[in-house]
Image (cartoon, helix red, strand yellow):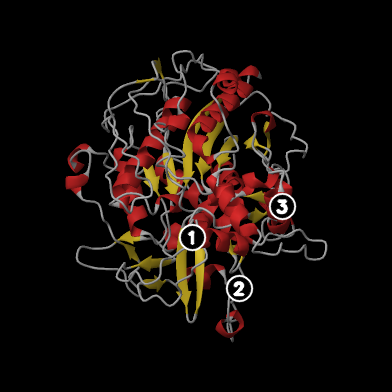
Amino acid sequence: MLSRTYQILAAFACLFQPFPVQGNECVDDDAQIALMGAQQGRDDMSACIDVMEGCNIQNHLGDSLREICCKTCSDYDPNKPAVATQLPSAGETIQVYLLAGQSECTGQAGAAELSADPQGYPELQGDIPGVWFAGYASPAAADRFFIAPMKAGRDRSLFGPEISFGERMHAVTGKPTMVMKYCTGGTNTHSHWNPLNRRNMWDTSADDGTAQWMADNGELDFSSKKTQFKNMVYTIRRTQETLLNAGILFEWAGIVWVQGQADLKGGDPVWKLFGEGTARVWDGFRRHIGRDVPIIDNGANTHNQLKSGKEYATQLVKGCKAKNVEFALASNDDTSTDCAVAFSTSCFDSPNLHLNPGPFLFYGYPPSFPDVDRKCTDRSNCKEFEWYRKYPTNLHSGYEGMILKGRMLANAFIREFTSDQLPSSFLHSDPASLFPWTQCADGTLPSEWNYCWIDYRNESMMTKPSSELCTYTKNIIIDDSHGPYGEENNGGATDDGNKDDSSSSNNNDNDNIFDSDFTDTGSDTYGGQNYGDNGQNVAAIEDTSAGSGSGSGLLVVLGTASIFFLL
């Protein structure tokens, strides 16, 4: 039976003519997908990247999707050869970073555009020395896992933050670096990534801890958004076992999480459900990699509720050591709801949104930005910068915007969690340092030249008093006392009691699309067997959501034009 997403697409596909191939170029018509989603109020259908699983449907709907989403579906062809594994040589311990999230984590930055700009980004051309990728050749499947030197375009024709993040971490630390990536567009923390979701559970009493057991018994489904956490556990095990079996020393060094927009409509208030859901996902990742590694988080953008939830998550997560990093391209004073920012709605004339022109003046304007020639008149230093995949129909990051994002995430990780010195040239081109998005002072709102975020956290609604939650301290160094995997590390994570093990309940707000009457019973059984994430106390929830978004949106307004920046 077709999923609800594809039933909707089937109902609307006949209304649209397939977007033709332009010359010899295979292109996506993301606007048609966004329009189909908008017709049904589906925020999780913003572009072809959110429906790529439908590319392999063998019927009229699949035929239509393969034409409308020509570029995406060419990447999602299961008949494409898998990528051969090329392991690093045994020697120095490799630092492994887990990268996960939704569509901006998956990425739509063009590898071809990067390859065509060797003067702008010479260090990112071809195989990047000292940096490796672990993950899947598109489309993701258990038999398409590989490890190889990091190279844009090796796993698919588009890339995410892994390219520049990995290169920057290696360049500064001097340590061999690996980015293990598993991301899916339009996925949320409440259900898709939630380890307590029924679809993300498995029989932990029978689990022998191997990737093969998960493949044989865990009911993995890489074609579904509903088993994200379980798929990630398999990916973690597959990465560890591949390296261990080859005698390669490694240690988990950190987590990079790029997600947000898909949770924007869940919860009342959003910040509470989102923050608790995010912390729950992070706790689950840390349990399965065996260390309370530092976390760098991104994806709030102009959404004050998401930013508040992300800050709340950094307070809740067990082991602390989590940091959200954004930059102020625009701020939202939340005084008007006449225009709801979405992938296909720029809200350029909405009075509640306040542009910070600094990033455009510093890095450059998108070449297709309206009136860019007029704005650059008589400006000798006016530059072009590929912020977006295709303005205005696909506003995920273009190759330069994605490179900037990956570097920003790496810079933040280095500054916050290591003793390595970030070169001044890197710091002076870092958007989070140049254009910080700070918390609004009490009694103030964002405004022109006051680019801040509104903190909606309310201590009376938190699971614990703020005095008992994490207090963030800069430059917390990873505890390496356990040593790297392959030596004396037994993989045992510690729980320092920073967060109550109980999960929050979801209130029964009729406007909450995630309404599922989810409560934590404290029971660790389901159907007479132990199910869940490593036997912790869990309560199964049904995934009743339709999903709500792909990537996170950041709207900026410049004159009469606008940009919706997906993060």
Q: Which amino acid lies under the numbered mark 3 shown in the image of this protein?
A: Arg
In the depicted view, which residue is nearer to us: 389 or 196? 196
- Sequence-wise, the earlier of marks 3 and 2 is 3
- Sequence-wise, the earlier of marks 3 and 1 is 3
In the rendering, which numbered label is found on residue 117?
none
On screen, residue 189 above or below 330: above
Q: Mark 2 points at which residue?
A: 383
In the depicted view, which residue is nearer to us: 355 or 321? 355
In the depicted view, which residue is nearer to us: 416 or 454? 454
Q: Which residue lies furthest to the right in this view?
A: 24
Across and down, in percent, residue 200 comes to 47, 30
Q: Which of marks 2 and 1 is in front?
A: 2
Across and down, in percent, residue 511 comes to 33, 54
**Separation of residues labelled 3 and 1 (CA atoms):** 44 Å
Q: Is residue 429 at all visible to an observer of this figure?
A: no
- Find numbered disc 2 in the image and state the secondary structure of the residue it sits on: loop
CB atoms of marks 3 and 1 within 8 Å = no
Q: Identify the residue at horizontal 37%, vertical 29% (top origin).
A: 540
Q: Which amino acid lies under the numbered mark 2 shown in the image of this protein?
A: Lys
Q: Name the residue under label 3.
A: 66
Q: Name the residue under label 1.
A: 428
